[in-house]
Image (cartoon, coloured by chain):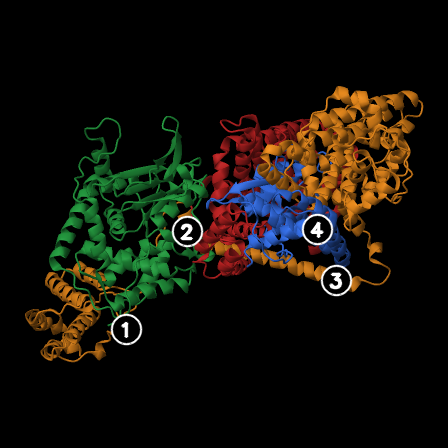
Chain colours: A red, B orange, C blue, D green
Amino acid sequence: MRQKAFEEKHKPQWLQLDSLLSSLEQQNGADNADFPALYRKVCHHLALAKDRQYSPHLINNLHHLVLRGHQQLYHQKKPFASQMVRFLLHDFPASLRKEAKLFWLSTGLFLLPALIMGALCYNNGDMIYSVHSVMGVADIEAMYDPANESIGRERQSDTDFKMFGFYIYNNVSIGFRTFASGLLYGIGTVIVLISNGVFIGSIAGHLTQLQFTETFWPFVSGHGAFELTAIVISGTAGLQLARALFSPGRLGRIAALKQAASQAVPLVIGATLMLFIAAFIEAFWSSSTTVSSPIKYSVAAILWLAVIAYFLFAGRGHGPR
Amino acid sequence: MDLDKIRVNVRPRTTAQAIDLGFVMARHWWRPLMLSWLMLALPMFILFHLIFYQMPWIAGLLVWLCKPLYEQAPLHVLSRALFSEKTSMKEIAKNLRSIAGKQMIANLTWRRLSLRRSFNAPVSQLEGLKGDARKKRINVLHGNKPSGGWLTFICVHLELVFYLSIFALISLFIPREIEVNAFELITGETFWIILLQDFIYLLAIAIVAPFYIAAGFSLYLHRRIELEAWDIELDFRKLNTRLNSQKRSSTNLAALFVVCSLLTVQLTDSTAMASENFLTTSDQTSPAPTKETAQQQIQEILKDEVFGQEETHKVWREIESDDQPEDIGDFDLDWLQKIAEAIAFIGEFILWVIIGALVLWIVYLYPKWTQWFGIKSITPRKKYRAPETLFGLDVRPESLPDDIGAEAWRLCQDNQMRAALSLLYRASLVTLMNQHKLEFHKGATEGECLKIVQQTQLQELGNYFYRLTVIWKAMAYGHQAPSLDDMQSLCEHWREHLGTKHEPAC
Amino acid sequence: MLDTSRTFETPEGVDLGLSIAGPIVRAQAWLIDLLIRAAIYIGLGMILNFLGDFGGGIWLIIIFLTEWFYPVIFEIFKNGATPGKKRMCIKVINDNGTPIHWSASIVRNLLRVVDFMPFGYAFGLCSILISRDFKRLGDLAASTLVVYEEPTASAPEIPTAEPAVPRQALTLEEQRAILEFSERSSRLSPERCKELAELLEVITAKQGPTAVEQLHRYANWLQGRS
Amino acid sequence: MSEETTPPTEHTPPTIVNKDAFEQAHAKVSQLRHSVARAIIGQQRVIDETIITLLAGGHALIEGVPGLGKTLLARALATAVGTQFGRVQFTPDLMPTDVTGHAMYESHSERFVIRRGPVFCNFLLADEINRAPAKTQAALLEVMQEQQVTIEGKSFALQPPFMVLATQNPIEQEGTYPLPEAQLDRFLLKVKIDYPEHEEESALVRNVTHGHVGDQLNVSEVKQVLNGEDVVQLQQLVANLNVDEQVFDYAVRLVRATRDWNGIAIGAGPRGAIALIRAARAQALLNGHTFVTPDDIKTIAKAALRHRVSLTPDMEIEGIHIDDALERLLEQVDAPRT
């Protein structure tokens, strides 16, 4: 068959597929029962056109049509909202439990330095200067000094908002980095975890030693449930990448990395959400000074229990389909 | 040399795709390109630093200035590799002077800052054109869409990226105890530090050079492929060969046409007088690593938005300056401030409300949560309301005649079997719903109704209803009329099973 | 044969070719996106500045969201292309040819942090230069590709001429070459056309401009014009 | 589309079904059911639906976690029908030619020999179809639709009866390639296998372990009760069973209801109704009627529709399964009017 005749014979189908694809691409394609058959036909046309060496522009146009068709047919459309719920109630806690070993490793990397530094700083007032600059320590001391009047004043809502933005920006970025730097054979993740542990532990130890407990502990205990857990979870995800690189098993390194990355995604997204929550609590609840310490402690206890219960129990069943 | 032996897939490409192909070529012939580049670059680097050891910044400047010189040899290698010809390094070394020295003065002076350097290089070097001829040729090749500028622009920045990255990497590995940071490395002034800077600069441009050269060459190549339809020529020539297979030698002569013009390497020294486009405004290469210029140019370039990855830092400064009320301006903005505070307060309030709503929602969804959490949940019973129609039959008690059995039998004798059966069946359902309080759904089929009836303890009623249903189904869907005997029996026994209790209710 | 395209065989048994986009065009797209983001930040910063700390907080949140999710959102909802990519006619897809989905997009964009290290996407660049399909580390981990989205070209017209049957039987490939010659002849110089046409003297038995004309006539016949 | 039988035009006079032939057919089908049920304890509904698919000349997609006797079912059915049985385990590296067959060059005879793939059989068990990449799935789906195989440009028609039993694991498992929604239409029914009841399970365990070394499947209990020709005749008979206008109408109303049902995002297409009728005819034979009743439609409605509709996001969020939604729909749509 000559090209012209071929074009004339099949043009209507191409146009039909083209308009069908356009409507599908705009995501309002209503009835697509004919689509696979039509697409298959045009695939056939392309194969014929290539085989018969029709002119390049015709082949190009058909190729383009088939490419679009392929993308539509094999496109997996899943409703976002249900995925999200499924993720929260099942995927996230389940995938963390699956990586329990790495999670405890990550926790250890974070908690041990924190405890050690905390103990050291608590026993030795000068110890903190080995990890912080004099200025930094002075700032922190000023922030939590109970004698300081400014912390006794209820902060305004707009300041809360500013801090909310700051916390989100800062914390989530740390979380992401903890994960992503796992790509450097885990070195980055380990460094971030340890240094965060050292940082937090030293400050906690130092302030406790200075008897600033009334301002410091109520402040951090609430959002800590989410924030610290999220950092450790990011670390778990980063370590997953590292593990894939160190022991790819029966896969190639790249393949192992790909697999690990896709398995780590739920953890990273979950950690991000947790950091959002942490930022919210930190900005609007922890900073509040009108709430008395016992209430803050009890809320903190509830939050910690909730987080632990969530990771222990959520998604144990088959999960919503 | 033969067009048939070309190693790339010849077809017209867009500018961007041509550049990409150049990168693929550079990756493929990385070793020879790199070696031939270093062959000149490394000795010159050492030479300059030996001569100007007292003023190392001049040496650095010279290293930068002579970049076009190093690029000649790789281009030569590439143009031959393209047609499957290997060039030994020995060969290059032997002809280094003739290859690299071509049109040297022009290349190092007024053409040095041309943004299209790598595109134009093949014209002068491979085609051997100079002066007006070269200029004309270049104009033809560029046509109305000159290309290569972006390539140079981005490659210069890539060099800078690598330059700074190497410093950053080094600083990562310097222990904290040694009080040297990357910044001091970049801005240091002693000879050794400048030498280090220059060497890192050499490394950075060495990484980029093969790609830059190959991409420029590929751009040049594709303009020619487009203008001269090489792909068609290849096909035509194959066709020719097929039809003239006995005269193969003669076609091969013709085959040399394109290739010769492309790759003639004229060995005469060039003192080209060409006054080509001279782009004075371009910032064509990265900063020469002298202490002042380096620092200054780095600062300048970092100010450029192109390098705005520093934007995060800018952000922090902005926030801090936010705290200074003077920034807002002299005019009175208190009211605005108050509005902002009000919005913030409302915003916070709304956020709390959202949290509260979320908690309520979670509590509300508790049954489903338990299900998701793996605990068996109790499916809530659906409310039942007696339907008014069933299978399209009116099943309200009011719609029925008084004596069902008799009425049905009358219809039978009129030969209206279907109507009779319909009446019997309908009446049965009504009675079952109202007297026996059975539940039938709107969509319940005959079989389901029967099952419900049979689940009751009324054995005889069940049997009767079973018979009725079977006959009714055969009539309604199989168009099989029942025998009169069957009908009589059904009509007579209706009252016995279903009629008695119904009668007084009517 | 060196080339920048990859072919995928679809389930229907058709080969689909995709041209992989290289570092230069990706850098250009990135620059455009960077300028857009910078413009957003500066513009919003000026407006939100009037709202004091509240505005500052909002601004930070917006910057945070934009910095991390700007590419993700565009890649999911705008067919794999940020505005910069759209401008440069490239887009992101999965490396099996299907459109990109959430998790891949999130992986490839979060890993920008690593690609960026130690400065200015140097690791990413190295990865792009080394890997076969111009993939940066994020692309490797997410199994994604950046490819050209080639717009469909309108049909080039073949110069009309009285159709003529070639004197010799031609293979399909040769027929296509003649068709392509005719389609592209308007963009070639007349001299070059002549040169090319004269290569086929075996068939046309003609020289000079008449040879070109003769090839056009064959092309008309081959295309099926009667 | 060879998959669809032409639906009778309106007001088709009821074809007279030969009573004796029908009784014979019913007896044969009952034998078949019992025969298969000997190998497979419990799961009567699954067996019935598979037999229905066979009688209606369609293909079935069976979903369930591994180890519930899917292979046994297919093998038992093939034994009972006395036809060729083929099995392909779909794996990520399975190529289309591994399914359809390919041409091989034989050096001693110096010619190409066509090696027929496993599809050249009467019963093909495509195990874990969603483990293979789309390419291989498409090859099988095409064979299902065309009932012929093309190897190296030559077409080979498949010997009827030809039926594919494709099994798939629930989609959520890792490393699977879900079938494109638009292509699921090719399956007449989607059969769901759940874990058996307690007694059934213990009977199953007893059956498999009793007097056997290893855990090979035991189909020795299954006797051949039909042959290929019988099946073709049965399929003919089923295709000619009476369907009343009202039942047609009921099927169409059900399918139409899926399209504007609150909670279903994408409803079934016209092929849904066709599948309903085809399967209901076979169900009628199983039940021993010469005509199709609404009960038959309702019995197979879920199997015929569950792979043709998809839920709206909010229903999914509420944890409602497609079967639940269909159940509600079936309750709400009026059964036929008289």
Q: In which quarter of the image is residue D115?
A: top left
For discs 1 and 3, the disc positioned in front in the rendered view: 1
Do marks 2 and 1 share a chain? no
Q: Which chain's residue wears label 4?
A: C
Residue A205 visible in the current orientation? no
Q: Mark 3 belongs to which amino acid?
A: Lys
Residue that mark 2 sits on: D183
Q: Which chain's residue wears label 3?
A: B
Q: Where's residue B189, x and y in %?
A: 89, 27
Do marks 1 and 3 share a chain? yes
Cα–Cα gap, marks 1 and 3: 64 Å
> From the viewer's perspective, is residue A31 above or below residue C56?
below
Secondary structure beneath dot 4 equals helix
Is B107 positioned to the left or the right of B263 in the image?
Answer: right
Q: Mark 4 belongs to which amino acid?
A: Pro
**For this rendering, which residue is in front, A155 or B254?**
B254
Cα–Cα gap, marks 4 and 2: 55 Å
**For this rendering, which residue is in front, D120 or B373?**
D120
Q: Which chain's residue wears label 2?
A: D
Q: Quadrant of residue B162?
A: top right
Secondary structure beneath dot 3 equals helix
Secondary structure beneath dot 2 equals helix
Q: Where's residue C159, x and y in %?
A: 65, 56
Mark carried by residue C209: 4
For discs 2 and 3, the disc positioned in front in the rendered view: 2
Q: Mark 2 belongs to which amino acid?
A: Gln
Residue that mark 1 sits on: B388
Does the residue at mark 2 contact the one at mark 3 (Cβ under 8 Å)? no
Cα–Cα gap, marks 2 and 1: 41 Å
> From the viewer's perspective, is residue B391 above or below residue A285?
below
Do marks 4 and 2 share a chain? no
Do marks 2 and 3 share a chain? no
